[in-house]
């Protein structure tokens, strides 16, 4: 089955009340799309990264009461898990799709990764396009646009990522739920490929510290 894009019904999943009911909809409606899309993106990222990459789909297994307010696929070089490594994500909140290169708080050596980024701050500023966004918390929808984001602000963001235990660093794109590109699978895949290709030098730089 080929990836068919994301529909308004996919975003409506997050209005379903109840953990079991929402999880059932995620498993039946969104995760099959993640499998199709993730398999394709794994091959692309393996070519970009120069090593085998593995697909992980969020299970939300730790949840016992509150239903998830977002869901995602992750792609990483480790078959056993992704949270402790730099990884790529594609996922949904109720109002947008996110495409991330993600460094979440479980990464054990995030201080070293952040230090490497700070040492190459000029390169990072040149690498990340103005239409990309940054986040310091993967559980929140809020993000910071790179447009008008100067080098000093990027340095402050990375310093917080380095020094605050729960701080994270995610960089990529947000695509609003009403963007027509989500209804055109090939166009969306093209945007995802371009996003991850743009971020691959950053990913490779961080692997030197991973």
Image: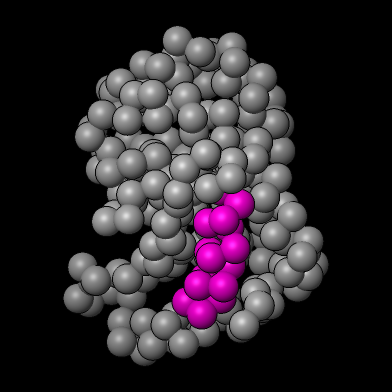
* Residue at image point 70% right, 60% down: 189
Specify whether 166 is left or right of 42. Answer: left
Specify whether 33 is left or right of 21. Answer: right
Q: Quadrant of residue 64?
A: bottom left
Specify whether 165 is left or right of 135. Answer: left
In this rendered view, identify the residue nearer to me: 79 or 185. Answer: 79
Image coordinates of residue 102 in percent, x first then y, are 44, 43
Q: Quadrant of residue 22?
A: bottom left
Write the start and end of the magenta stretch as one range. 30-45
* Residue at image point 28% right, 38% down: 107
The N terminus - image quarter: bottom right
Image coordinates of residue 15 in percent, x first then y, are 48, 80
Image coordinates of residue 203 in percent, x first then y, are 49, 33
The C terminus - image quarter: top left
Give the vertical position of 83 relative to 206 (above or below): below
Specify whether 55 is left or right of 130. Answer: left
* Residue at image point 42% right, 82% down: 27
Judge whether residue 142 can be spotted in this image: no
Judge whether residue 195 can be spotted in this image: yes
Q: Name the main secondary structure of what is drawn in magenta.
A: helix
Q: Quadrant of residue 199?
A: top right
Does 32 lie within the magenta span? yes
In this rendered view, identify the residue nearer to me: 8 or 117. Answer: 117
């Amino acid at each position: 089955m080929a990836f068919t894009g994301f529909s308004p019904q996919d975003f409506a999943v997050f209005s379903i009340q109840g953990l079991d009911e929402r999880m059932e909809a995620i498993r039946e409606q969104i995760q099959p799309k993640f499998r199709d899309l993730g398999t394709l993106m794994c091959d692309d990222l393996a070519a970009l990264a120069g090593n085998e990459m593995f697909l992980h789909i969020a299970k939300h297994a730790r949840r016992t009461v509150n239903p998830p307010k977002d869901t995602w696929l992750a792609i990483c070089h480790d078959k056993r898990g992704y949270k402790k490594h730099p990884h790529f994500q594609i996922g949904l909140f109720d109002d947008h799709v996110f495409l991330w290169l993600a460094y979440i708080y479980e990464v054990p050596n995030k201080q070293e990764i952040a230090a490497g980024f700070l040492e190459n701050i000029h390169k990072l500023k040149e690498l990340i396009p103005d239409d990309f966004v940054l986040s310091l918390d993967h559980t929140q929808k809020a993000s910071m646009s790179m447009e008008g984001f100067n080098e000093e602000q990027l340095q402050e963001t990375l310093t917080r990522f380095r020094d605050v235990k729960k701080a994270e660093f995610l960089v990529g794109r947000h695509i609003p739920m009403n963007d027509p590109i989500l209804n055109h699978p090939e166009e969306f895949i093209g945007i995802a490929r371009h996003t991850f290709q743009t971020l691959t030098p950053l990913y490779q730089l961080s692997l030197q510290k991973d």
